[in-house]
Image (cartoon, helix red, strand yellow):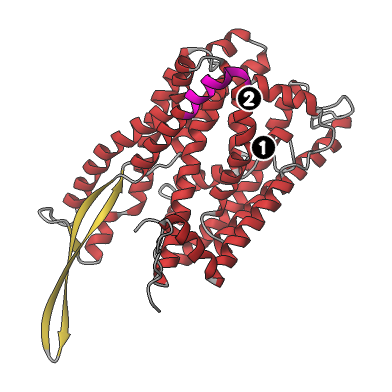
Amino acid sequence: MQRAQSGSKPKLFQAMIDAFRLPDLRRKLLFTFAMLVIFRFVAHVPVPGVDQDALATLFETEPLWGMLDLFSGGAMRYLSVAAMGVYPYITASIVMQLLVPVIPRLHALSREGEEGRRKINQYTHWLMVPMAMLQGYGQLILFQREGVFQETIKIGLSGDALLPTAAVLFSMVAGTVFLVWIGERITESGIGNGISIIIFGGIVAGLPGNIGRALVSSGTFGLIKLVILLVAITLFIVFVSEAVRRIPVQYSRSLFRGGRMYRQSGGTHIPMRVNSAGMIPLIFAYAFLMFPSVIAGYVGSVFIQDLFGVEGYLYWVLLFFLVVGFTFFYTMVIFQQQNLAETLQRQGGFIPGIRPGRPTADYLNRVIVRVTWGGAFFLAAVAVAPLLSRWLVGGIEATTLMLISAAGLLIVVGVVLDTMRQIEAQLLMRQYEGFIR
């Protein structure tokens, strides 16, 4: 097969045309699109007894609910059966990652290859269900306190409220399980990481509404400044997301041919990403900072709500340092699970100038700590980016939009880059020009 020529067409559009020319790749793309359409239909199926006007007012006045709506893929804004999105699954996955190095049985499974990963994934699904029930019940209680449900619907675990609560709660858990199933089908039969694409679809679907609210709040000139700020943040995210520190690695091994021993050597590198934690630290930090507002809602304390609200500066200072701390915590937990030094020694690899074993492990730990400083401050800067919108544009609506968009951009950029890499790999396998090269 001859290499496809782009001719006079731009490389990006030519690559898209080449992708749709390949039957199997076209099937993957269409399957992914069809699953996203199904997800958007499910996201608009509300649970019984919801006062949509009260729900819309809540999301307009409380920016933190907009952040939860982001991770639900836009389904919480309608309090649909998929209102929790895939967030319980993400939480269960994080918990399992933290438990693997602690519990010997899970640590042993992680070393058993594909079969061990499949078993850990099964445990993650089991853990997701009780976590979804706890999260769903907590959300229903909070929504009831905000007056979102009609008077005919009572939320509780006793009396006449038990049956309606069970019906609403089980429907929300079923919606979460269904979205996770859709995401896994996308991963297996489509293009990209299905769970991330589900969240990506919700962010993109909510973009027109966010732009409209920003236009009403800030005016045309304010919206232009906000868009310029978002574009600058996007370029910053792409630059840091693609930044890696390459650690050179040499391999040497002996081969016997014709009764003689030959030594072969080769070199490669270990890519140390500046932002290897993704947006998980942001999820941790936002969840941690939501506790004061939740507690204030229970006890009715306006002072606590004002103190930890997005309108005050204490919220942003705490958010900055929490993101930095969680970035180091999550990165080191994941890095320790990889056991790179042990893997290199087992495969006959070594870092030039560094002895195998413990010295290699210490060297890699020093490198990942130095590199993670850049990723930690990068994520913290993205997290506090809404302050820039307050200073440049003004208005709490612009701050709320940036609060959602800054975190959402991390997901959007990550999903787009990952999907492009997968399409690129499929095209290069068939000797077509891709997006990047």
Is residue 416 visible in the rendered image? The answer is yes
Q: For the residues marked 2 and 1, what is the alpha-carbon distance in whole angstroms?
A: 32 Å
**Which amino acid, mark 1?**
Leu
Judge from the rendering whether residue 220 lies leftward or rightward of residue 336; answer left or right: right
> Residue 195 versus residue 202: which sits nearer the camera?
202
Q: Identify the residue at horizontal 44%, vertical 55% (top origin).
A: 12
At label 2, counting other C-alpha atoms closer than 10 Å, the crowd grade (few under 14, some 14-19, many 20 or more) is some
Task: Residue 224: say if magenta.
Answer: yes
The C terminus is located in which quarter?
A: bottom left
Does dot 1 land on a helix, a strand or a loop? helix
Residue in the foreground of this view, choosing between 149 and 408 = 408
Q: Position of residue 376 (x, y in %)?
A: 35, 33
Q: How many marks?
A: 2
Residue found at x 63% / y 39%:
72
Q: Quadrant of residue 145?
A: top right
Q: Compared with residue 229, is residue 17 higher up or lower down, i.e. above or below?
A: below
Mark 1 — residue?
134
The answer to whether 373 appears left or right of 294 in the picture is left
Q: Which residues are magenta?
A: 216-227
For this orientation, the residue located farthest to the bottom is 258
Q: Earlier in the sequence, mark 2 or mark 1?
A: 1
Q: Secondary structure at mark 2?
A: helix
| Residue 378 image offset from top left, x and y in percent | 36, 32
**Circle 2 sits on which residue?**
213
- Asked if 118 appears above or below 237 in the picture, the reply is below
